[in-house]
Image: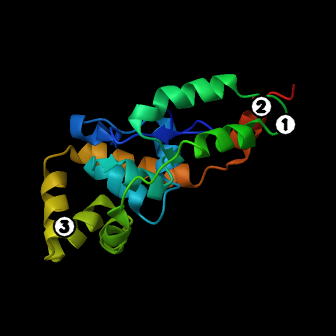
Amino acid sequence: FSVHGSHSVASEKFLFAMPETTIGLFPDVGGGYFLSRLKGALGVFLALTSHRLKAADALWAGIVNAHVPSARMNELQAALGAADLSGSRCREKASAVIASFASDAGEPTLPGLMPEIDRYFSAATLQDIVANLEAAKSEFAQKQLAALKKLSPLAMAITLEQLKRCAMRSDRKSTRLKSSHVSES
């Protein structure tokens, strides 16, 4: 349900995107936080281009923790409801229940794209990212350049700056908040 939750499960119907720059906005603070912690320049790529990910890629990227077929979601919900999730090991217990329903999400495409994503989207400025894409002749680069040219330059510049600032934020506060919400009963 939420990338910020302790357990996130996707089905074959799952589709993930950060479309804010498409409508002239930028990701909310939570989006900036988790996007800046993805592998390489993946977060910048997703935030700037609004590229969509299916379950296999979201699982590979760490955006979701497990893939469960939609036909088994009601069973998973019932199993979680029936499980004793109390105590200090509640997360591990929930993980075990989810794992018993998890299945292969298929082959991710992102690993093959990461060299190009990192090459083009690791630049420090939006102008440099665009220049990287303009200089490249690959089909992937030209597709991303065409996508960026349709978006708000201001929204993309703000998004890039947001990701830079979020990358420097400490995880200490979020860890403290998560641990304070864990039931110790």
The residue labelled by disc 1 is 88
Query: Which residue matches tag 2?
Result: 182
Q: CA distance from mark 1 to mark 3?
A: 47 Å
Asked if disc 2 and disc 1 are in contact, CB closer than 8 Å, the reply is yes
Residue 102 appears at what percent x and percent y? 52, 46
Residue at the image position 47 percent from the left and 41 percent from the top: 68
Left or right, residue 59 beside residue 19: right
Q: Label 1's element?
A: loop
Badge 3 amino acid: Phe
Measured as percent of width and height from the top left, residue 100 is found at 60, 44
Q: Using a 10 Å C-alpha cutoff, classify the residue at mark 3 as few (fewer than 14 neighbours), some (14 to 19) or many (20 or more).
A: few
| Residue 72 higher or lower than 107, as above or below | above
Give the structural element (helix, strand or loop) at label 2.
loop
Instruction: Kindly check if marks 2 and 3 are in contact, taking CB atoms under 8 A apart as contact.
Output: no
Residue at 33 percent across and 48 percent down: it is 54
Contact check, label 1 and label 3, Cβ < 8 Å: no
The one nearer the camera, 126 or 142, is 142
Q: Which residue is mark 3?
A: 140
Residue 82 lies, with reference to residue 54, above or below; the image says above
The image quarter in which residue 4 lies: top right
Q: Please tell me which of labels 2 and 1 falls first in the chain.
A: 1
Closer to the camera in the image, 71 or 67: 71
Determine the secondary structure under disc 3.
helix
Q: Quadrant of residue 183?
A: top right
**Alpha-carbon span between mark 2 and mark 1:** 8 Å
Residue beneath the point at 36% across and 45% down: 158
